[in-house]
Amino acid sequence: MLKPALLVLEDGRTFRGESFGAEGETFGEAVFSTGMSGYQETLTDPSYHRQVVVMTAPHVGNTGMNDEDPESRKIWVAGYVVRDPARVPSNWRSVRSLDDELSKQGVVGISGIDTRALTRHLREAGAMRVGISTVETDPAALLVKVQQSAEMAGSNLSDAVTTQEAYVVPAVGEKKLTVAAVDLGIKANTPRMMAERGIEVHVLPSTATLEDVQAVNPDGLFFSNGPGDPAATTGQVELLQAALGAGIPYFGICFGNQLFGRALGFGTYKLKYGHRGINQPVMDRTTGKVEVTAHNHGFAVDAPLEGSTTTPYGEATVSHINLNDDCVEGLELQDEKGLKAFSVQYHPEAAAGPHDAAYLFDRFVELMNNRKA
């Protein structure tokens, strides 16, 4: 017999279901992910730190969990919400069930609720704080705790998920380039995709300074994805501004796109419910091509969609837009020598997700080679 579980949103909306994963109580920002697969990569994406993820796909856990697909050292989600968890996993790579892994890592979840109704509520009311409990049965009592929990706006979280020590991912085959990658919540597939292109990747902690970056003699600088509010982050913005001033080519994804925007003088703002999942349509305005992309962000850059903006580092333009809501999905910086730096809001490393955006790593290689020449 499964233990009853209670979910309460900060506006008082309540759902009752059954315990899934660890028993106990957890709080975070309620967000929904539209991916129909790739839940292991979602769970281990550090960008989901302090977020309770609602899966819109009704059946979750059917392929179990394996030891090859994690994108980081642990599960980062604060809580997990599914409608119909698989009773028995069925995949030749599976070594344990999703339920067992959530329990092992202390992740509190809830199952058996109408995730469609919950998702529709979040779409209408916006992402908000939530609590899940298997020990509290009174919604009013849990609501008080939810309303006392921390909000995502104003939270600086990259230091909580970053590596504690610098490490190197060697190039596959001949080493052609060196990149300093600042870990703000990096996923394992990102340096792997760079390494496949002959890049030696030096992954640095989020507290890295310009001196730390220059010490590896990089051909380029990379800022990863990560959690939190970009407006609450200052140290990495100052690092990026110094690097741009020193002429180091730059590529950023997700949180790295938001910090790039702030380094160029643009603001950032919180989206109503964000973009999360592996099916978001984005247009690359530099080529006119549309790609289906993997997303996980609740904040966006506030930059003019048309024309260019003069910055201390060159001319900035919006290079990519989301075709659902015209959200800024990418930035480019040009100077008299051409492309100097660029970023995208989504996840071109595609773990999980479509591989439409893998070309961006090739664009980074081309940028570094052009700057060296």
Image: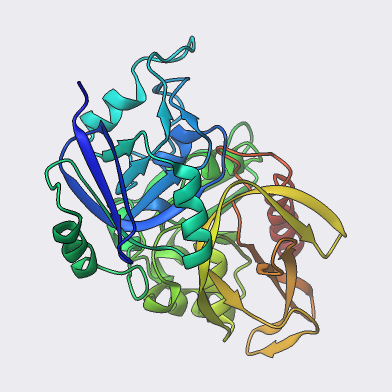
Asked if one can make out residue 20 in the rendered structure from this viewpoint, the answer is yes
Q: Residue at x 57, y 67 (%)?
A: 257
Q: Quadrant of residue 332?
A: bottom right
Camera-nearest residue between 237 and 9: 9
Q: Is residue 86 above or below residue 193?
A: above
**337 displayed left or right of 57:** right
Q: Is residue 44 left or right of residue 318?
A: left
- Is 142 located above or below residue 4 in the figure? below
Give percent across and percent down for residue 85: 40, 26
Q: Quadrant of the C terminus?
A: bottom right
Q: What residue is shown at x 31% (from left), y 26% (from top)? A: 99
- 28 relative to 335, above or below: above
Q: Is residue 106 visible?
A: no
The residue under the point 52% across, 54% down is 120
Residue at the outermost right position? 288
Q: Position of residue 331 (x, y in %)?
A: 68, 70
Q: Nearer the viewer, residue 196 or 370?
A: 196
> In what quadrant of the picture does the N terminus appear?
top left
Res 72 quadrant in image? top left
Q: Nearer the viewer, residue 152 or 113?
A: 113
